[in-house]
Image (cartoon, coloured by chain):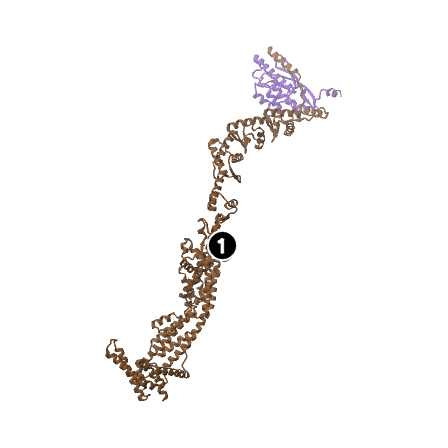
Amino acid sequence: MDDELLELQRQFEFAQQAKSSVRLSERNVVELVQKLHELQIIDFDLLHTVSGKEYITPDQLRHEMLSEVQKLGRVSLIDLADTTGVDLYHVEKQAQVMVAGNPGLMFIQGEIISQNYWDSVAEEINERLQECSQIALAELAAQLHVGSELLTSVLEPRLGSTVKGRLEGGQLYTPAYVARVSAMVRGAARGISVPTNLSALWSSLQQLLQEMDGATGVSVEASFFQSLFNELLKGGEILGSLRAGVYWTPSVFATAQKECVDSFFSQNSFVIYEMLSRLGISQPVQYLQSRYPDGLPLANAFVHPSLTEMVDTAIEDVIERSSWIDSLSVLPASFGAQDASKILSHCPSVQSALKSNKALILGESFVFSNAFIKDVYDRLEKEMAVANLLGSASVNLSDDRYSAKDAKGARDSGFSSELNETSSESMPIKHAVDKGGRKKKGKSAGNAKSGATESGPDDQDFVPTKSKKNQKKSKDVSSVHASEVKSSTKKDVKSQEENQGILSEEWIVQMITTLFPDFEEQGVDDSSSIIRSLANHLRPMLINSWKEKRKAVFTENAERMKRLLDNLQKKVDEASLNIQLYEKALDLFEDDPSTSVVLHRHLLRTTAASIVDMLFVDLDAYNKLKNGAETEKPENPQFGSFSSAERTALAKTFPGSLSKKALAVIDALEGKRVETFMTALIDFAEESGLVVKKLDKKLERALLHSYRKDLTSQVSTEEDPISLLPKVVSLLYIQVHSKALQAPGRAISIAITRLKDKLQDSAYKILTDYQAATVTLLSLISASTGDEEDCTSERISSKRELLESLMPPLKSVVLSKPQS
Amino acid sequence: MEGWDPSTKSTLTQIPLLATKAGPRDGGAWTQRLKEEYKALIAYTQMNKSNDNDWFRISAANPEGTRWTGKCWYVHNLLKYEFDLQFDIPVTYPATAPEIELPQLDGKTQKMYRGGKICLTVHFKPLWAKNCPRFGIAHALCLGLAPWLAAEVPILVDSGMIKHKDDAPSSNES
């Protein structure tokens, strides 16, 4: 047998004989342990592992945990539960007990961390910090998987000892780095000389740092700069003031600003706000008011009282001199109208003058003394009177319109001229639908706006209301003038335009500029505007005075018109009766056409012409009076007779149909028949409101009687032999035919022959002789050339003597007649 | 290796495997084989002992080691039932597995051939054939007898076919 085999057999035997190890089942063990518990042999808590196969005492667990923590420095409870194999609940409980009993440990977010761990971490951080010179805390916290707050709380006690650096705004910095950045901040802050928003500065610094550090540079937060800045500021290393935390005004700048303002203000005694804002002072008024409490804030500038005083004295002077001043001319060039008006409101002299009505402020900056304005007003009034005389006509219409417009003009007098145009322009539109009578007027008004260059569409919106008003107004006007002579409508329109010209702003402005050229001389750029405002101021007054005057003229004229008409009527009566009387006498010559024509013409030339002239002149005067024109009294009713052309011109000035009638009268005057003239004259007189009396018997007799008396006295006193003859003939005709004959020289011989059968022969003889002698004398006189030829002159004188000798018998023929 | 419970399988894998392929008639090779059989058995026994799972005693009945005898036991309801155990090494061994006999239980159960040879599961033979020559006596016991005992003894005890030796006298007496 193999030894080895035997040996194996023996081993096998031995193995089989060996006592088998006794094993307890888990169940048994668990039961045993429970039994031990029950029997109080185990008097402490027993924990079992997660697998359920092990029991562990809390002390052991704590020990194990502690050793684990000390080994790793930082262990999470979950890891501990894993490594110890105990339920997390027990681990947590034991961890709390453990941390509470051990000050070197902390329990944070499910982790147990020992102080040693923090020490090592701090050292690590320090190393890194020294390398990088700055680290973000957040970065560290993320690396360590702890909250940055925790990290801060842990790091803070170690700053300066373990960690050589400084914690600022979530960043760790080395002192060297801090010193460098603070040097940068100091340099930047000192370099700034104007107010700056610090955040902009920080961003530029940040950029600078980034460039210096290259790509690895960590951005430095602005708050870091800010805190460094604040430190520097507190330490007095930089000077200035900080507003709202970020707005930095260096004291250098503030001082310069202050000095600049001070020097300017003290030199010029005013400061323009714009200058201040250029200097960087955002609220100039408050700034200046706090600095110069006695100053005066204006719209654009801040002035010292002395400037006000200056203006004040200037204005005082002006008021005393009764002149005017543009306060802007006294003030510095940079002052605006608003400033001027404000200064004026602060001038005591202006205030007192305004109160006592001695001055007037126009256009904000212009001060006019009342005396000056009165002067202007007087001169304008005079000017107006002149203009009125020139353009006098019926002015009522336009005046009414103006007064109405003025009521409104008080509000928007500034553009009343434009409104003028607008309204006149808008009128045709509105009046198109108006009644026909007004159409003509509207059209002419439309024509009047020849100068209306611009009528912006913006004007259109107030056109309707305005034109409506106008319409109403014009209706009023028309009702007022309904009683007036209708035929004068056209003339009214014309004169209306004229008057618009007289009292419009433009006119006043023009007048002022011509009357007071010093407005231009003063070098006032916008002289027209101030003149305009002056004109606006004056216009209502002017219009008022003008109206009053016109009213006065009206009342005066009314009386005069009445008198004139009465006079005229009387004169017409007289003249027409006379002419009718003479006309009757013409009947005697109806059978002799040639003589009749001569007689007719003579009558027309003399008596009729004078009647027409008288009528025309008086009617013209009447018309003028009616229009309120200041006419001189027709002092001289005995004006010389007009030529027919003059008559026509005068007739044409009459309104409407009257003019036509007048022309007809003139035509008739040129004709040959007195009858046609009479009908035309009657027509004309009726048109002008006069009555031509018809001749009746009684009147005729009375007239004849007076005529005869008159003639008789004339004949008896007549010394001139030539002019005696016609009078004698006329007297004879009255005596013979009871007819008043007006005969020209040529017709006298015929008239005498007609008398032949009515007179005694002797008387007739005397008459014919006288007539022949007169004719020869006249022919001699007309033949004489003025040369001193003795024969003719002698003959003339001899004839004259002959005539003179014949005069008494002739006179006696006539004068003795009634006695016989 | 399906068909066996996990403990059996784990135990089986821990038994050292054999290497020599030799039958009882192969002389020196058989001796070599026998040595390996012993080593495997020692390992298996030690394993059982350490697991408090000792369940058999065997020894070679002849010097050639072709016949083996011993005892095996099973604990059921805190009672230990012990049976005699014997088997021969067949001539074709290791291609053929040894037929384990429990003579005491002959005729008491269906899971047994005549002469007390136990019926093995259908899985045994293919597994054995597959692992020839690496399986030896220890493997046969582990794979064959141990499961058979675990399965059959409780049934036999419950059906009253076998009685505990302490009860036997009493039953005999009665």
Q: Establish if B156 lies above or below A650.
A: above
Give the residue number, with chain letter if any, for mark 1: A350
Give residue B48's quadrant in the image: top right
Tell me where residue A286 appears, x and y as whole percent: 52, 45
Where does the C terminus of chain A fall, quadrant-wise?
bottom left
Q: Which type of secondary structure does the marked residue at label 1 adopt? A: helix
Residue A229 falls left or right of residue A106: left
Q: Nearer the viewer, residue B138 or A325?
A: A325
Chain B appears what colour? purple
Residue A116 position, x and y percent, is 59, 25
Residue A122: name its quadrant. top right
Q: Is residue A213 left or right of residue A67?
A: left
Q: Colour of chain A?
A: brown
Q: Is residue A494 above or below residue A610?
A: above
The percent position of residue A549, horizontal first and vertical second, equals 45, 66
Residue at mark 1: chain: A
Q: Nearer the viewer, residue A545 or A150?
A: A545
Q: Amino acid at mark 1?
A: Val
Residue toward you, A401 or A296: A296
Q: Is A32 situated left or right of A566 in this image?
A: right
